[in-house]
Image (cartoon, grey):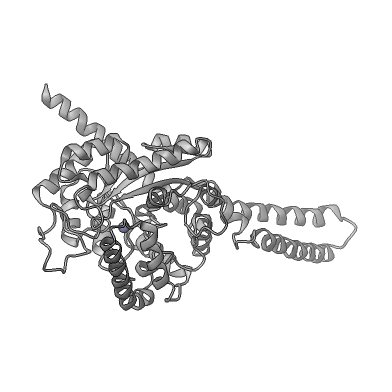
Amino acid sequence: MSLYINESCFFSAAQAYTIFLLPSMEMSKRLLAAKFLIFSASVILASALVFAQGSDGAGISARARSIHESAIVVDTHADTPQRFLDENFDIGSTDPKDNGHISLDKARAGNLGAEFFSIWVDPETNQGHFARHTLDLIDSVYEQAARHPDRMMMAFSVEDIGRAHKQKKLAALMGIEGGHSIENDIHLLRDFYRLGVRYMTLSWSNTNEWADSSGDIDDPKIQHHNGLTDFGKQVVLEMNRLGMIVDISHVADKTFWDTIATTQAPVIASHSSARALTNAPRNMTDDMLRAVAKNGGVVDVNFYSGFVDEDYRKASEPIGKQAAEAVKTYLEKQKAEGKAVTYIEVDRIEREWAAKIPRPPLKSLIDHIDHIAKVAGVDHVGLGSDFDGVAGATPQGIDSAADLPKITQALLDRGYSAGDIHKILGGNVLRVFKEVERVSHEMQSQKVSSNK
Ligand SMILES: [Zn+2]
């Protein structure tokens, strides 16, 4: 916008100069000179524009860079806590060989302002102690923030995210991925809120005792509930009351519709893409996208290649099965030898298999953002990378949080305005979070008055 304003001002000045400051020339010649000067000026200006837009090494124009740098960028899903806990990975790592998606340097390079770190408890390897492992992962995020107080801070509210942004620190938030973490105990849900957890995905790929998952909905061996049970609905309402965002990524379709009918606050899909473009059962149908729009919520696009590119998804089906077999064999072998299995070991096996499929272009990811913006509206789409949780299987060009400006460039290239890009990069999530906080205060004050 500002570039065009400068452009027209420049033309007017050139015209005025030739017409009024060269009075000795005939009018026709003066006009000709004016035209020539305007032509030269436009050539110079065009070259300047090419220079300005011609990349900073990463193919990001000056305008895209400025839009990106002036945004509060919020990503709603990264699995890095598995690395904190299992590998003792330090988020301050500067190791150039580290192929992880998130570090403080990578976050700084991509102007990532706030990350919702995923507290994901593998239901297979943590049977019998889901809550304890949840606590260990929560601790691992706090420990990272304690190690790097100058560059990172724990955040629990929209206000905290704003404060971190002003101090140029990464705001670290936490979301529990999978309702099994609360072990069917509403008291534990409240305790996790008190420890700072600000969203919970109702189920992971496993159906728990109160919410069906898309991950096993076709498995007849699993006991399903036709969506949410009564306790599940109680969990949703208690999350509304607490101010914990309800996350419907991973859930079965019926669970989604039950949640939409139950919740009193906007919901998020912390890391889900569009099913109309990529037919994964975990992606959202257009009807669901419209329902989230009506609910006032936001769908944060998952970057995983298998969720944003149909060719990749099809190719990954047989390979995914082989990878799952390889992981299972490894788990059984370790178990037989009495050894624990770490996330990074499983990740290594999955990466080897994922590397057999060519990476899709960045365009596939942008298509999903664009589709959701068109179907649900630009106020209802955001970023939910699933960084450090997808065995490195991201589209070309997206190798870490440092590459986030490429998304801004691609959206700009498609004609998105700076304001809309800011919404997609984080504004929409912040709006939802604020509304969740407001509904929570309202519900709590009603509770107090009804108790009187
Ligand atoms: Zn997930």
Report the side of 126 relative to 167 (left or right): left
Q: Ligand 1 falls in which quarter?
A: bottom left
* Residue 157 placement (x, y as % from top left): 36, 36
Q: Evaluate whether residue 68 shows in this view.
A: yes
Q: Name the residue: 55% across, 49% down.
A: 105
Report the side of 442 relative to 384 (left or right): left
Q: Can you tell which quarter of the image residue 445 is in? A: top left
Is 391 above or below relative to 181? below
Q: Which residue sits furthest right?
A: 24
* Residue 235 placement (x, y as % from top left): 17, 44
Q: Name the residue: 59% across, 55% down.
A: 63
| Along the line of sight, the residue nearer the viewer: 388 or 449 | 388
* Residue 100 placement (x, y as % from top left): 47, 57
Q: Which residue sits furthest front?
A: 337
| Along the line of sight, the residue nearer the viewer: 280 or 178 | 178
| Along the line of sight, the residue nearer the viewer: 190 or 320 | 320
For the C terminus, the image quarter is: top left
Is 281 above or below relative to 150? below
* Residue 56 placement (x, y as % from top left): 64, 58
Is 333 above or below relative to 89? below
Q: Evaluate whether residue 283 shows in this view.
A: no
Q: How many marks?
A: 0
| Along the line of sight, the residue nearer the viewer: 331 or 7 | 331
Q: Can you tell which quarter of the image residue 347 is in? A: bottom left
